[in-house]
Image (cartoon, helix red, strand yellow):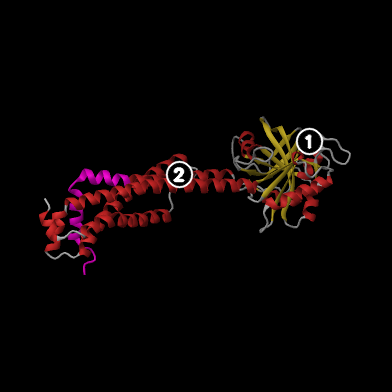
Amino acid sequence: MKLFDTDAFREILDSLMRNRSRSLLTGFGVFWGVFMLMLLSGGSAGLKQILNNNFEGFAQNTCIVATNNTTKPFKGFKKGRSWNLNYSDADRLKNLMPELETVTPSVSLWGKTVNRDEHTYSKAVVKGQRADYVNIETPDMYYGRYINDADNAQERKVCVIGKNVYTNLFPEGGDPCGQRISIGGSYYTVIGVDWKESGGINLNGRAADAVTLPINHARRAYNLGDDIHMLCFTAKEGYTMSDLTPRVREIISRAHYIDPTDEQAMFLLNTQLIFGIVDNLFKGINFLVWLIGLGTLLAGVIGVSNIMMVSVKERTTEIGIRRAIGATPKQILGQIISESIVLTMVAGMMGIVVSVGILSVVEMAVKQAQFQVSFGTAVLAAVLLTVLGVVAGLMPASRAMSIKPVDAMRDE
């Protein structure tokens, strides 16, 4: 038994090449369907990766609490009252809500000027943070280290600078750790450089513009007392932030004499909802991609089936002669289906190759994401093409099998 029948393959090619224009136009429908499916699928994957890169390093189960003026009176206090979070709110949440993993306070002061010798950067954001803030937003340390617990406990005059601060104060490059910079006349020793680019979520200023100090020193240096500007927390595994935020609102509201139903008085940013929206968005996009691609591909396959029907009608006499000299219905069926599969597969593979080539060019141009289809998607497309090729050839093959030799001889 031959593993590959060259005669049969030559016969298939000869049959398809008898009318090249018809075969090319028919195959183009399949080519375009696969091309669109692969191109849209790879483009969607690349766009999703670009969007995810903007949120890279940010915990997905995070909630950020900030304050606003009250809009409802409560316990003798009039509406419109301003209020501030305080440092003890972090301990309060940690003690009353064991479902929370990390609870960390943060302060920020905008528009600060940072100096080093003759170099100046006037757009810096001074941030006061604890070591556990890395559980909220992971820094990308290029040099040195981040703030640790000892820095905070001892109120050390050290700092971590962002990318823009580094490039402006240290234009000569090199490791700045150990060198000193000044903020408002106070000098701080640089212990690290955070190379994190600004992304889709910027908490109290861009990371690239930040000068991060131990929060205990920042509160004392800028006379903030017990006040903080922001409170960040993450949920433990198995808990959803949406279920925990009502309790957080109630605990903080009760401590600051705020109506728990006054949603405008307390701003809660639930990043889990943001990431969920992004995921659902791309699920919808992927559904539309496959819907459009498969619809276009199905239209191409219907065209293949119609052309094969025409081909069978034109070859009625040929098929009758083959039946007369001993060809079995199975052989006739295999011949027609094979022609359909070859036409569909060749056109489809060309669509995959061209789409992958275009996606490669886009990927080299963008350089921020991989605009490519996965290997599994390509295999699925190949299997789908084979199945559709068989389906497209079934009706023409069935018609060919029904041709009787005597009737075929009479056909003109």
| Residue occupied by mark 1 | 69
Disc 2 residue type?
Gly
Question: Is residue 287 part of the magenta span, yes or no?
Answer: no
Work out whether residue 374 or residue 119 is closer to the camera in this orientation and state it.
Answer: 374
Q: Which of the 4 quarters of the picture holds residue 230?
A: top right
Q: Viewed as shown, does residue 139 lie left or right of 82?
A: left
Looking at the image, do the residues carrying marks 2 and 1 touch, with CB atoms under 8 Å apart? no
Q: Is residue 245 visible to the viewer in this orientation of the structure?
A: yes
Relative depth, front residue between 7 and 363: 7
Look at the image and tell me in which quarter the N terminus lies: bottom left
Callout 1 environment at 10 Å: few (<14), some (14 to 19), or many (20+)?
some
What number is the disc on residue 43? 2
Q: Earlier in the sequence, mark 2 or mark 1?
A: 2
Q: CA distance from mark 2 to mark 1?
A: 44 Å
Taking the spot 39% from the left edge, 44% from the top edge, the residue there is 36
Whole-percent x and y of residue 342?
27, 54
**Residue sitting nearer the eye, 325 or 133:** 325
Identified at 73% across, 57% down, the residue is 99
Task: Give amino acid for label 1.
Answer: Asn
The spot of residue 353 in percent (x, y) is 34, 48
Q: Main secondary structure of the magenta part?
A: helix
Write the residue at 69% across / 54% down: 235
First to last magenta residue range: 1-29
Query: Where, by quadrant of the figure, is residue 76 drawn?
Result: top right
Q: Position of residue 49 (x, y in %)?
A: 52, 46
Q: Mark 2: few, some, or many residues within 10 Å (few <14, many ≥20)? A: many
Instruction: Please count the marks in the image.
Output: 2
